[in-house]
Image: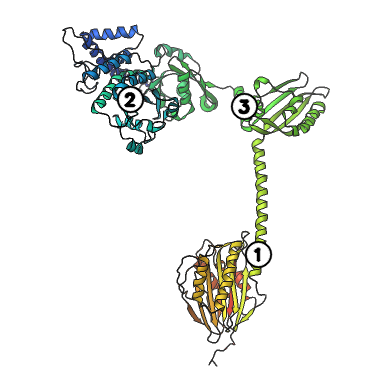
């Protein structure tokens, strides 16, 4: 259709309302043409079947179909599909028999090109007779279950079928089991719905639109989640999708208990059966056409006279029958403003043109539910800004949807000020989980809000409870205090604010009752106003907090006890010297500071002893971890290292044996770092080896250097580490620092920054005498210590002279 174009003057403004009506009429005509195109192919094919059977003309065949539809109270489309599904033998007025086709439609029947299945070779006589019987039986199948039983009765003797299942596609892609035969109730309950997952054969068949033959159970079970309880019940099966022009929406499954492939004859037979029952399947699966109101043109004057915002919506269905949009067939003048459009007539337009995201909102779900059940829908109140007398105002609205035959009437209801106050009070009670209560002491008539019944878990049909009877609802332990407070309120008018507990079907609830009395002219309490509040969630949170604090205090006491125990054990195993030591002509000062962060004690340790041959042994180590295990490992390494060096082991050999000890110890499986140094006073020779430890610091002549580390790996890391010794000749006045990483590490900075900071501190404070080590530690350690610190300060005095020196 086309609308005549009206030429406009150069300065004329187009009439938007007239343009909207033109668009509406054109869209209605397009919908009519689409529906006619979708049904004309089916009608022409059915007329061809009638012409082939009766030998009549096309006009007579069309009239015959109309008479049949009217007599059976069916639509013309339903009668056409039933005709296509009835393979009655063809009759010819000339007496020449017509060949029966495999689809039940006479060969040569006229129809639109491409609307029917491709031509198939004629079936054998027994198959054709079987299809003839099936076609006659299908006419009497009124439900999917009847259709499944009919197919099983037909296919059981011919193909050995044991069960038939029919699935239909629903919105969202899932499948519903709409018909079945030969299947147990337990199996039906388990497979009633099939979600749109991959690896399910019936879904793959629907996606491809071609039959899916599953004839090798062992291989098929690897590819698909086979339907069955158990799946081995049916060793072979086929899924036959319903042929359609726009994709299959239903699928028939034929399941056999025996294994083996389907023969070519069986496959052709099953394809013919699918084509034969396609019409009946479509008739059963097609959604009922909605019954619309008499005429949109007849109700539009009524809507134009309404003083509220209202619309008449007609559902628009998609190819599979689901509602995809709503057409606005009538609307009041205020409807466009309610939709958020200030210009143009909404009549004829689609609802989703105004709100593209409407399907995600409650209104869409309310319209769908009202259309399906007939139950009215009323949405939650919402704020809407409108212009009243030229002034923008914020008003409260709610949307109501009712069904009118096959259409929907949507109304926007504007709430008055009193309605808004009542709604706010209801929201306040719901959000605060409290409700108001009144008691008239003169008439003994109580009055509660609905929220009080919800809080007390009491049926509103039982009515409210008198104030004097309220303590009986409380737990036995809380009744005396609540009774005393209520008596004082009733007799003396003393306000109350009392917590109490009640037992409900959902467990014990913690409540609060706050009330006050209103006195008459004589000062006697006459009425009580109050509220009941549910404090269960808050009380549970308080109890959980108290319990958490109790557990924290208990854990803190346990950890403090453990720290005290470990500290005492460490002091027993690692006694600190009370003064500066003199070893092999060297002045040695020791410092050990435990960590301040946390409650654990670390595994740092030292050794400074004089060996039997007059040499001095210096050891600094650090065990990974904290607590008793770290202290135990520290003691084991400390005493073992001293023992091995005293008994003649070299430094590298001692490190290798300590590594083996850590790897094979049952009690400890940790790691450790260590520096071993042996000083020979006659040659002033310092031999040292390390295992993953920071290098010693040497202060000589006011300059600081770090000794070059010989190869050495962390103890306890690998079974065959390589350790080597390094050598340094000390000179009078030299100062050597051996330390653990707690002195230089300061996360998250790199350890090189800590080594540089230590070098600067030593250079800045080259002080002799006792106490110099303490000053150095004060400079290096700022803030809270996260790790233990152990330092050996070794000095060679200036006055000492070596052999041959002047």
Residue highlighted by disc 3: 426
Secondary structure of residue under mark 2: loop
| Residue depicted at x 22% and y 23% | 118
Q: Nearer the viewer, mark 2 or mark 1?
A: 2
What crowding class fits label 1: few (fewer than 14 Cα within 10 Å), some (14-19), or many (20 or more)? many
Which residue occupies the foreground of this view, 607 or 324?
A: 607
Q: Position of residue 567 (x, y in %)?
A: 65, 64
As measured in the structure, the alpha-carbon distance from the residue carrying label 2 to the one carrying label 3 is 62 Å
Residue highlighted by disc 1: 567
What crowding class fits label 3: few (fewer than 14 Cα within 10 Å), some (14-19), or many (20 or more)? some
Q: Tag 3 or tag 2, which sits nearer the N-term?
A: 2
Kindly identify which numbered label has been placed on residue 261: none
Which residue occupies the foreground of this view, 379 or 94?
A: 94
Which residue occupies the foreground of this view, 50 or 43?
A: 50
* Relative horizontal placement of residue 568, taking residue 397 as reference (left or right): right
* Relative horizontal placement of residue 529, taking residue 188 as reference (left or right): right
Which residue occupies the foreground of this view, 645 or 762?
A: 645
Q: Is residue 805 visible?
A: yes
Q: Is residue 782 visible?
A: no
So how many labels did they put on this image? 3
Residue highlighted by disc 2: 161
Q: Position of residue 705 (x, y in %)?
A: 50, 76
| Picture quadrant of residue 784 | bottom right
């Amino acid at each position: 259709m086309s609308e005549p174009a009206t030429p406009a003057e150069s300065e004329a403004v187009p009439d938007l309302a007239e343009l909207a009506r033109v668009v509406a009429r054109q869209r209605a005509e397009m919908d009519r043409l689409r529906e006619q195109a979708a049904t004309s192919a089916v009608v022409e094919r059915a007329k061809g079947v009638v012409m082939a059977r009766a030998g009549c003309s096309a006009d007579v065949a069309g009239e015959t179909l109309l008479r049949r539809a009217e007599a059976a109270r069916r639509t013309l489309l339903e009668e056409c599909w039933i005709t296509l599904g009835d393979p009655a033998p063809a009759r010819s007025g000339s007496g020449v028999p017509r060949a029966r086709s495999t689809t039940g439609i006479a060969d040569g029947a006229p129809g639109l090109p491409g609307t029917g299945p491709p031509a198939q070779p004629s079936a054998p006589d027994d198959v054709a007779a079987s299809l003839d019987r099936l076609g006659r039986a299908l006419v009497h199948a009124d439900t999917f279950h009847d259709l499944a039983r009919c197919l099983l009765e037909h296919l059981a003797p011919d193909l050995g079928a044991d069960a038939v299942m029919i699935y239909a596609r629903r919105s969202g892609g899932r499948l519903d089991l709409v018909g079945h035969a030969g299947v147990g109730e337990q199996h039906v309950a388990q497979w009633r719905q099939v979600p749109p997952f991959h690896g399910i054969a019936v879904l793959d068949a629907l996606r491809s639109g071609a039959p899916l033959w599953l004839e090798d159970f062992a291989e098929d079970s690897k590819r698909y989640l086979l339907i069955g309880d158990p799946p081995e019940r049916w060793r072979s099966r086929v899924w036959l999708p319903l042929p359609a022009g726009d994709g299959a929406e239903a699928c028939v499954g034929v399941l056999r208990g025996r294994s083996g492939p389907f023969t070519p004859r069986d496959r052709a037979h099953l394809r013919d059966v699918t084509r034969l029952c396609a019409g009946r399947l479509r008739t059963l699966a097609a959604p009922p056409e909605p019954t619309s109101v008499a005429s949109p043109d007849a109700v539009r004057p009524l809507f134009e006279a309404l003083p509220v915002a209202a619309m008449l919506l007609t559902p628009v269905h998609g190819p599979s029958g689901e509602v995809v949009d709503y057409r606005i067939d009538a609307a009041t003048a205020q409807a466009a403003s309610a939709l958020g459009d200030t210009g143009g007539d909404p009549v004829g337009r689609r609802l989703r043109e105004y709100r593209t995201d409407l399907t995600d909102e409650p209104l869409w779900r309310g319209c769908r539910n009202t259309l399906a059940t007939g139950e009215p829908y009323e949405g939650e109140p919402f704020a809407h800004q409108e212009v009243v007398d030229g002034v923008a105002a914020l008003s409260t609205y709610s949307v109501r949807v009712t069904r009118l035959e096959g259409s929907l009437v949507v109304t926007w209801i504007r709430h008055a000020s009193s309605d808004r106050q009542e709604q706010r009070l209801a929201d306040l009670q719901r959000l605060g989980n409290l409700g108001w209560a009144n008691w008239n002491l003169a008439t003994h008539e109580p009055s509660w809000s609905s929220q009080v019944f919800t809080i007390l878990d009491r049926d509103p049909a039982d009515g409210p409870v008198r104030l004097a009877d309220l303590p009986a609802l409380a737990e036995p332990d809380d009744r005396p205090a609540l009774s005393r407070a209520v008596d004082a309120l009733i007799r003396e008018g003393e306000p109350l604010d009392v917590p109490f507990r009640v037992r409900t079907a959902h467990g014990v609830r913690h409540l609060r009752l706050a009330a006050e009395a209103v006195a008459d002219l004589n000062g006697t309490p006459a009425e009580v106003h109050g509220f009941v509040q549910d404090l269960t969630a808050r009380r549970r949170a308080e109890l959980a907090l108290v319990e958490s604090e109790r557990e924290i205090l208990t854990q803190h006491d346990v950890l403090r006890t453990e720290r005290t125990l470990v500290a005492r054990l460490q002091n027993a195993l690692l006694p600190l010297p009370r003064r500066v030591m003199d070893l092999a002509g060297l002045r040695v000062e020791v410092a050990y500071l435990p960590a301040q962060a946390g409650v654990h004690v670390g595994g740092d340790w030292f050794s400074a002893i004089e060996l039997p041959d007059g040499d001095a042994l210096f050891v600094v180590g650090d065990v990974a971890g904290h607590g008793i295990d770290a202290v135990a490992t520290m003691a084991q390494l400390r005493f073992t290292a001293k023992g091995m060096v005293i008994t003649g082991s070299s430094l590298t050999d001692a490190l290798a044996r300590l590594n083996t000890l850590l790897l094979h110890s049952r009690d400890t499986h940790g790691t450790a770092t260590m520096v071993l140094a042996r000083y020979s006073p006659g040659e002033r020779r310092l031999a040292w080896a390390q295992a993953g430890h920071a290098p010693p610091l040497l202060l000589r002549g006011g300059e600081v250097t770090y000794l070059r580390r010989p190869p050495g790996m962390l103890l306890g890391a690998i079974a065959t580490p390589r350790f080597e010794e390094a050598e340094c000749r000390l000179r009078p006045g030299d100062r050597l620092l051996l330390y653990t990483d707690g002195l230089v590490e300061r996360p998250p900075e790199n350890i090189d920054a800590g080594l540089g900071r230590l070098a600067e501190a030593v250079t800045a404070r080259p002080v002799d005498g006792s106490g110099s080590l303490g000053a150095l530690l004060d400079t290096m350690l700022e803030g809270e210590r996260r790790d233990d610190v152990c330092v050996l300060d070794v000095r060679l005095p200036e006055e000492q002279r070596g052999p041959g020196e002047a």
